[in-house]
């Protein structure tokens, strides 16, 4: 009976440099003291990014703004049931994976099967949710329908997954870098392809959980999923180059250095984005002429961090308010030296001032 054989990873100066950068960046994020309310809003931006970009990889048609609205329980959008279930499920499972990791619950089959059950809620029924697949599965080109990769036979999945989870637990107990372990787990999981649907989304969620369990909490501030989507062609190329056409043709102990370099670079870019939000936020919460508990204007910070420039009508739509209130909010930011007006009348645009620009405005 087939057994799980972990891939090999050759460590070189490039990988060591990436590991050092990521570890140092995590230290900077952990050490920096921030306003708690502002942290909440950074996390909300990261959460929407994670949901939007991870489901987009798999073909979800919702825009980022639609995902934002879908995650607000009091908002309704026009979309297919499947599209809505995908984003709502991803958001819920993302929180569950984080809680699982922070509670230091074991990385067991329950960890995988319970989260798969929730990830596919409302999308598939019966043994297609929360059970390893019971049929052959092939990864196909979405445009040509040509088979790109033939996953292992379903009868081998249970033993391969038991081996993968045993390897994961041993690695995390050893002195192995959790960054390397997480990256390799992602590759091994999608290569085994244990489910008929949801493998990519679940791999990205579980990988975040591994990182979180070892103190790498970058997902609070930026989404690794975003980098995979922005580098989608490279994401698939990095996988398929090593997977080949058939699972059973993959050489034992194959060196997956190229995938690890790709994955670590995505994580590096995620930390870059996190640090730009946390260590040098575009809007300084302490400069606002309002109470730190004023949730509406704190939410506005997240919008301007993302969009940089908005018209009053855009701001009103995104915030779900009338234009009069929107203009009043924006004027408070202008008075605080945080935004500047461009143009006049209804064509006025409000643009963020960077820290250096704000310093010059105040002189």
Image: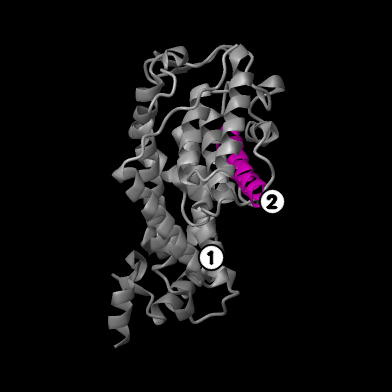
Residue at 59% over, 15% down: 156
Q: Which percent across, then down, holds residue 204?
A: 51, 38
The first of marks 2 and 1 along the sequence is 1
How many discs appear?
Answer: 2
Q: Which residues are magenta?
A: 76-102
Q: Nearer the viewer, residue 106 or 324?
A: 106
Residue at 59% over, 43% down: 173
Q: Label 2: which residue?
A: 103
Is 89 within the magenta?
yes
CA neighbours of label 2 inside 10 A, class few (<14), some (14 to 19), many (20+): few
Q: Which percent across, then down, holds residue 202?
A: 56, 34
Residue at 50% over, 28% down: 188
Position of 54 with respect to 194 (left or right) is left
Q: Nearer the viewer, residue 351 or 90?
A: 90
Regarding residue 347, the answer to whether it shows in the image is yes
Q: Nearer the viewer, residue 105 or 238?
A: 105
Is 44 within the magenta?
no
Q: Which percent across, then down, holds residue 26?
A: 46, 58
Q: Label 1: which residue?
A: 39
CA neighbours of label 1 inside 10 A, class few (<14), some (14 to 19), many (20+): some
Which circle, 2 or 1, is nearer the viewer?
2
Say above or below: 270 vs 180.
below
Spot the residue most to the bottom.
363
**Res 306 → quadrant:** bottom left
Regarding residue 61, the answer to whether it shows in the image is no
Say above or below: 57 vs 94.
above
Which mark is on residue 72? none
Say above or below: 210 vs 80.
below
Asked if the residues shown at circle 2 and circle 1 are in contact, with their CB atoms under 8 angstroms apart, the answer is no
Say above or below: 66 vs 258.
below
Element under disc 2? loop
């Amino acid at each position: 009976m087939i057994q799980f054989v972990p891939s090999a990873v050759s460590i070189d100066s490039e990988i060591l440099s990436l590991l050092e950068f990521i570890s140092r960046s995590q230290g900077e994020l952990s050490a920096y003291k921030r306003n708690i309310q502002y942290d909440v809003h950074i996390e909300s931006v990261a959460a929407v990014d994670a949901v939007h970009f991870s489901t987009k990889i798999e073909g979800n048609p919702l825009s980022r703004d639609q995902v934002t609205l879908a995650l607000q329980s009091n908002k309704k959008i026009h979309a297919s049931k499947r599209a809505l279930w995908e984003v709502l499920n991803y958001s819920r499972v993302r929180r569950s994976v984080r809680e699982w990791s922070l509670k230091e619950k074991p990385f067991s089959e329950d960890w995988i099967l319970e989260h798969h059950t929730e990830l596919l809620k409302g999308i598939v029924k019966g043994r297609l949710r929360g059970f390893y697949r019971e049929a052959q599965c092939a990864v196909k080109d979405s445009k040509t329908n040509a088979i790109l990769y033939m996953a292992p036979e379903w009868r081998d999945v249970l033993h391969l997954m038991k081996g993968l989870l045993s390897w994961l637990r041993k690695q995390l107990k050893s002195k192995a870098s959790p960054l390397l372990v997480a990256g390799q787990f992602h590759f091994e999981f999608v290569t085994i392809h244990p489910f008929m649907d949801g493998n990519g989304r679940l791999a990205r969620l579980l990988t975040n959980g591994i990182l979180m369990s070892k103190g790498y909490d970058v997902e609070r501030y930026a989404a690794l999923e975003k980098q995979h989507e922005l580098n989608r062609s490279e994401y698939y190329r990095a996988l398929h180059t090593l997977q080949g056409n058939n699972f059973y043709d993959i050489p034992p102990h194959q060196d997956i250095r190229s995938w690890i370099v790709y994955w670590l670079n995505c994580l590096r870019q995620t930390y870059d984005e996190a640090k730009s939000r946390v260590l040098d936020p575009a809007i300084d919460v302490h400069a606002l002429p309002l109470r730190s508990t004023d949730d509406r204007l704190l939410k506005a910070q997240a919008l301007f961090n993302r969009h940089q420039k908005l018209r009053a009508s855009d701001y009103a739509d995104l915030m779900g308010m009338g234009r009069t209130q929107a203009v009043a909010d924006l004027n408070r930011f202008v008075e605080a030296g945080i935004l500047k007006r461009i143009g006049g009348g209804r064509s006025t645009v409000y643009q963020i001032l960077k820290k250096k620009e704000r310093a010059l405005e105040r002189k």
